[in-house]
Amino acid sequence: MLPRDLVKRIRRIEIHTRRAVDTGLAGQYHSVFKGRGMAFSEVRQYQPGDEIRTIDWNVTARLQSPYVKVFTEERELTVMLLVDLSASGDFGSREKSKAEVAAEIAALLAFSAIKNNDRVGLLIFTDRIERFIPPKKGRRHVLRVISEILGFSPEGRGTSISLALDYHMKLMRRTAVTFLVSDFLDQGWEKPLRLAGQRHDVVPVVITDPFEESLPPVGIVYAEDAETKTPLLLDTMSKRVRKSYEAAAAARRTSRERALRRLGLDRVDLRTDADYVRPLVTFFRLRARRRVA
């Protein structure tokens, strides 16, 4: 049985994310992630404006009246959520940690998927494969996905995106829409991500915290790397220290963005101190626009 506070958090996320889904996000998701193709459904009488190429000439000749073929989209997409729950995800300088934002964005994507009759699966990883939940449909399954992310206690502390992608490639033989949710504080993921992108529709979702970009002048701060436990003493009143910290953060960000651009993958950038619905809506709109162009 789930703890009461976890149930409350799951319920709050469900209410918030389903509201966003019901007010249009599911429709935008549908327009961006198409099904596997078109399947014949039925024939009906021709109506002005129908595409001439859809006329069924055999039925038309037999009934002496023009009839057209009607096709419906075959969806049954598989959406995989690869969620990084390494120790760095516990960090959050505002109301939410990166792991909490990951849970909420996963819920948003999962509810959009099931509203479009798609299946959703979950892969939780750190520097090891922590948990795999096979793709299924339905609200109860989505709630399980959310509860796993929020309540899971990983064994590993580090991050291995390449391990998660390799496991995903071995497991998912058929094409899947794959959201890779991580802070990308890792190395060696570019080649595995390129290979995964050749088979699957991979969307990196990058979560950052403002304190990872710059330090406020608050005096002497004792810090510790969440994954390696390496201690660090910082004099945040020193301009030199703050500038050095910001320069290292900017270099890390630039390297990550260049790598993702080289791969040609669309990505979603999220922050723990900002709304996550708007960036996702912007991503859907831009991607839909490119598909039409």
Image: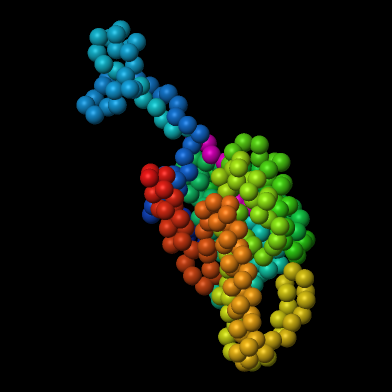
The residue depicted at 73 percent of the width and 52 percent of the height is 163
Q: Which residues are magenta?
A: 75-82
Check the picture and name the quadrant holding the N terminus: bottom right
Report the front residue among 7 and 26. 26
- Asked if the magenta segment contains residue 81, the reply would be yes
Is residue 151 something one can see in this rendering? no
Report the front residue among 272 and 289. 289
Residue 92, image x, y percentages: 61, 73
- Asked if the magenta segment contains residue 251, the reply would be no
Report the front residue among 223 and 148. 223
Residue 56, image x, y percentages: 34, 16
Residue at the extreme top of the image, as rendered: 62
Check the picture and name the quadrant holding the C terminus: top left
Report the front residue among 193 and 108. 193
The residue depicted at 77 percent of the width and 74 percent of the height is 229
The residue depicted at 26 percent of the width and 16 percent of the height is 66
* Position of residue 231 in the picture relative to residue 104 (left or right): right
Is residue 165 something one can see in this rendering? yes
